[in-house]
Amino acid sequence: MAAGLALSTRSVVHGCLRSNPARVLVSRRAASTTSQQTSRSSAKTAAYASLFVVSTGLFAVYYFDCRAAIHKYVVTPVIRHTLDPEAGHKLAVRVLSAGLAPRDPVADDEVLKTELWGETLSSPVGLAAGFDKHGEAIDGLFNLGFSWVEIGSVTPKPQPGNPKPRVFHLPNDDALINRYGFPSDGHAAVLGRLRARLPTLFPYSASPESDSPLHGEEHASLRPNALLAVNLGKNKSSPPDSIADFVTGVQTFGPYADALVVNVSSPNTPGLRGMQSRTLLQELLAGVTSARDQVSASSTHAHRPKLLLKIAPDLTEAEVADVAAAVRATSGIDGVIVSNTTIQRPSSLSDPNKVEQGGLSGPPLKPFSLATLRTLRSLLPASIPIIGCGGISSGADALEFARAGAAAVQLYTAFGYQGPGTAREIKDELAALLRKEGKTWKEVVSEAVEKNSLREGQAPKTTEGESLGAASVALLVQEAEELKRLLDGLGERMEKSVEGTTLAQDGHVVAVTAPPSAS
């Protein structure tokens, strides 16, 4: 049967060929063409897919390099012009915290090596407090090439800060005015984030006596050549002269930070700057150093965070002298940051937003910060380093602060205007300037500190060249003379008020008259 079926099939085929050979030929050609088109289509698809993959890879390499021009000239300006300042700020923090931000792929130049408290940092360029207020983007910021990242300010209890709007760009001046007022997630939330980023190789124990809170890491930054600092603020609801919030901050974050910054210089918290007065400041510094020493003593891994004070640029020279005296009188203060934002408005400001209240930062702040730094440097011994902050937006600015005696510098407003490549750009410019001079950063700083610092046994000098002790005596004499003048005036008024009246004394009438004139 199968043989018959095969014979029948062949007969049909031969019959078709004899009756219509062209139809069969066309069918064969059509099958061949379809096959070729499918092959070509698959090749094109593969080529396009490969091109897409390669292009995406190249763009990713380009995007994740913080030096890429797209960040400075496209992404950052678009964010600044399409979002309000606070919304743009929050977006940047979220991108950094999600690991989607660029990175600095270049090792720092050897001439930039910086020494602080015996620690060697890869560069002197750090990030000031105020950008990462809640400790959300610490590692993303370190990945941008900052050798010092300072989070905060952090207050003990959560608080919303001042009403919005509270941040204002001054693009005509490359400046910023903010009146944030310490918005904070509070100690508990920020502490949780600091703990969450620690290695999980070792089981965590909340007791310093039984385990290292840093899980064996040498630095809280989790990096060998960088430091993590926490900026401590106080709640608006706390008594203005209370030091309790700062003491609590030291106790909470001491085990988890390389440095703690006592912030008494924000202009946006009522009464806070009053703590820079000598009496209150000495009490505050004594309280926080005692708390830090207790944290260190209870630790089995000998972790002792550095304590720094952050001051305002609006202090008079006499007030700077009081700050210096309080720092010198308190054993255990490791450094000072100069400075916070200013409430002054230089005449050079041209942007319409200059009328907004709050702290001004950016290039217009630099002259005030430098002046305060130079004054303070002359009133402190070389053993107490000063961190320069305020208006630094270039390598030349950083070098100017070094020549004034700053051991390191911090950025803030320039980072917002220039984008994620700011630290690398400033470091490259700074390295080129140092190489041109044939010096390292450490050499420049060492020369400036040696030249401008208070020497051991030397009495601090005022701007008039007299000792502060003599100036204090002169001030006391002046105040005594003023008090005598006021008392004399009060006596004269009392005499006039009773002149011409009569008083009864022992049954006699006594007339009260004015004393004879001395003339």
Image (spheres, rainbow, N blue to C red):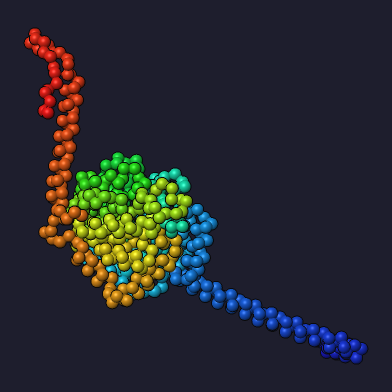
- The residue positioned 43% from the left and 57% from the top of the image is 173
Up-down relation of residue 251 to residue 127 (above or below): above
**Residue farthest to the right?**
19
- The residue positioned 26% from the left and 54% from the top of the image is 309
- The residue positioned 12% from the left and 25% from the top of the image is 517
Residue 180 versus residue 460: which sits nearer the camera?
Answer: 460
Spot occupied by residue 176 in the image (x, y as percentages of width and height): 42, 54
* Residue 163 in sight: yes
* Residue 217 in sight: no
Residue 134 versus residue 481: which sits nearer the camera?
Answer: 481
**Residue farthest to the top?**
507
Spot occupied by residue 192 in the image (x, y as percentages of width and height): 37, 54
Residue 395 versus residue 83: which sits nearer the camera?
Answer: 395
352 relative to 474 in the view: left or right: right
Residue 348, image quadrant: bottom left
351 relative to 448 in the view: left or right: right
**Is the N terminus in the top left, top right, bottom left or bottom right quadrant?**
bottom right
Up-down relation of residue 219 to residue 328 (above or below): below
Spot occupied by residue 4 in the image (x, y as percentages of width and height): 85, 88
246 relative to 137 in the view: left or right: left
Q: How many marks?
A: 0
Residue 368 versus residue 46: which sits nearer the camera?
Answer: 368
Residue 365, image quadrant: bottom left
**Residue farthest to the front?**
519
- The residue positioned 17% from the left and 60% from the top of the image is 454
Spot occupied by residue 213 in the image (x, y as percentages of width and height): 29, 59
Residue 150, image quadrant: bottom left
**Is the C terminus in the top left, top right, bottom left or bottom right quadrant?**
top left
95 relative to 148 in the view: left or right: right
